Image (cartoon, rainbow, N blue to C red):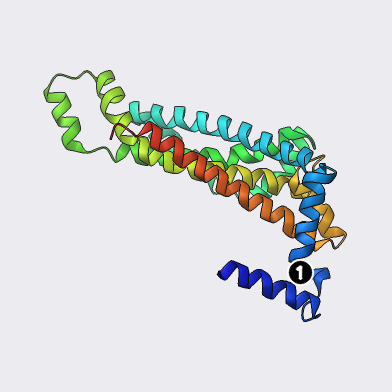
Amino acid sequence: MFLLILIGSWELATRRDWVDPTFFGSPSGVAAYLWSGLFVTGSIFKDLGWTIAATLISFVLGSAAALLLGLAFARFPSLQEFCEPYLAAINAMPRIALAPMFLLWFGLGIGSKIAAGVSLTFFIVLSSTIAGVRGVLTDWVILSQTLGATPTQLFCKVTLPSAVPVIFSGLRLGLVYSLLGVVGCELIASEHGLGQQIAYLSSSFNMSGVMGLLLLLALLGMGATWLMNRIEKVLLAWQ
C-alpha cells in the first residue's frame, strides 16, 4: 500500500509540475522506458547480459580464491599471520578509486569489470570464511580429538560444515557487492552494460530511463539474494 501511495504521489507531482520530471523522471516514463527496452526493441537485454555475465564471473573467481585462501589460513595459521598485514593494507584501498587503473590495465571490455567485482567480492568472502572457521565450537573440536579424529577428518567433518552458515552470509553479500563493483566500473567507462547506459541516460537528462535501470538493478540484487538463500537452505538441510 505504501509503495502504491508513493508511486501515485510521484506521478501526481510530475503531472502537476510540483517537481520537474527532467530531474526526477516519472513512474509512467519509467514504465514506458522499461516496456520499450524489454519488450519492444529489446535493447536492454544486451546490456543486462553483459552486466550479469561480468557479475557472475567476478563472483565465482573472487569467491573461489577467497574460500581457498580462507581455508588455507584455517589449516595453516602461520600463513594467515604472514599474509594478514598485506591483505589488510590492500583491503583498506577504496576499490572504486582503483577502477581507472583496472580500465587502463584490462581495457573498456568485460575484463576491467570483472577485476572490479573480484576486488570487492574477495575480501568479503575471505572475512566470512575466516570468521566461520574461527567460530567453530571448541567443545566439538575437543570431542572429535578425544574420539581419535585426524586433523584432516577434523577439518572436513567438523570445522568446514560448522563454518558453512557464516561463509554463506559472506557469499550472499559478496554476490551483491560483485554487482556493485561491476556497475560502478561501467559507470566510469564501458563498451556495454547497465552502468554504461545509466551514465549515458544521465548525460542526456533521461531520468525516467535512469530510474528504470536503477529499478532493474534493485530487482537483480533482490533476485541474487533470494537465490543464495535458497542454495543455503538446500546445503544446510542436514541441520
In the rendered view, tell whether residue 216 sits above or below residue 20: above
Q: Is residue 73 visible?
A: yes
Query: Which quadrant of the figure has residue 113?
Result: top right
The mark total stands at 1
| Residue nearest the observer in this picture, 85 or 93 | 93
Name the residue rendered at 56%, 49% in the picture.
Answer: 222
Image quarter in which the C terminus is found: top left
Q: Which residue is mark 1?
A: 24
Lateral position of residue 133 relative to residue 93, left or right: left
The residue shown at (45%, 38%) is: 230
Closer-to-camera residue (94/180): 180
Dot 1: what SS?
helix
Q: Quadrant of the N terminus?
A: bottom right
Q: As rendered, which of 179 and 29 lies closer to the eye?
A: 29
The amino acid on which the numbered mark 1 sits, given as a three-letter code, is Phe
Please rate how many residues cluster around mark 1, counting C-alpha atoms within 10 Å: few if below 14, some from 14 to 19, many from 20.
Answer: some
Q: Position of residue 176 (x, y in %)?
A: 56, 45
Q: Closest to the observer: 20 or 185?
A: 20
